[in-house]
Amino acid sequence: MVTGPALTFRLLVAAGCILGPTVLFLGFWRLLGRLREGDLVARLADRGVARQPDVSMGDVLETVTDASGGPRRCERCGVRNRTGASACRRCGRSLE
Ligand SMILES: [Zn+2]
């Protein structure tokens, strides 16, 4: 049975192991938020180097559910080809 200072030490170590990753994650999250809203991005956007990130949830859903970016079916033989393929994998017909 562990008692006294050793028990206290073990409890502190356990609490650190549990809370540490959470605190690090929240700190990282806040850092990313500050970077996104920082004036460096606005200055780069003014110079035309970078684009001002104004991504909305609608943009994300539109990209995820965009059917044109998915697997494409060949018009000649009907085979489903992988995303981004330029030619049919069976008959070689151009998918452009
Ligand atoms: Zn084909």
Image (tube, rainbow, N blue to C red):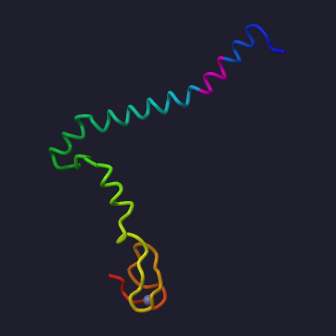
Numbered marks: total: 0
What residue do we see at 50% from left, 27% from top? Answer: 23
Report the span colored magenta: 12-18
Residue at x 49% of width, y 88% of height: 90
Q: On the rendered image, what quadrant is the N terminus found in?
A: top right
Residue 41 lies in what quarter of the image? Answer: top left
Residue 15 appears left or right of 52: right
- The quarter of the image that holds ligand 1 is bottom left
Nearer the observer, 45 or 90 = 90
- Residue 92 within the magenta-colored segment of the rendering: no
Residue 90 sits above or below residue 55 on the image: below
Position of residue 76 measured from the top left corner of the image (x, y, whole percent): 40, 92
Q: Is residue 4 above or below residue 19?
A: above
Against 50, residue 38 (above or below) is above
The residue furthest left is: 46
Q: Tell me the chief SS of the magenta region.
A: helix
**Residue, x 35% and y 66% (percent of image)?**
66
x, y (%) of residue 25?
48, 33
Q: Position of residue 20 (x, y in %)?
A: 56, 27
Looking at the image, residue 33 sits to the left or right of residue 54; the answer is right
61 above or below 17? below
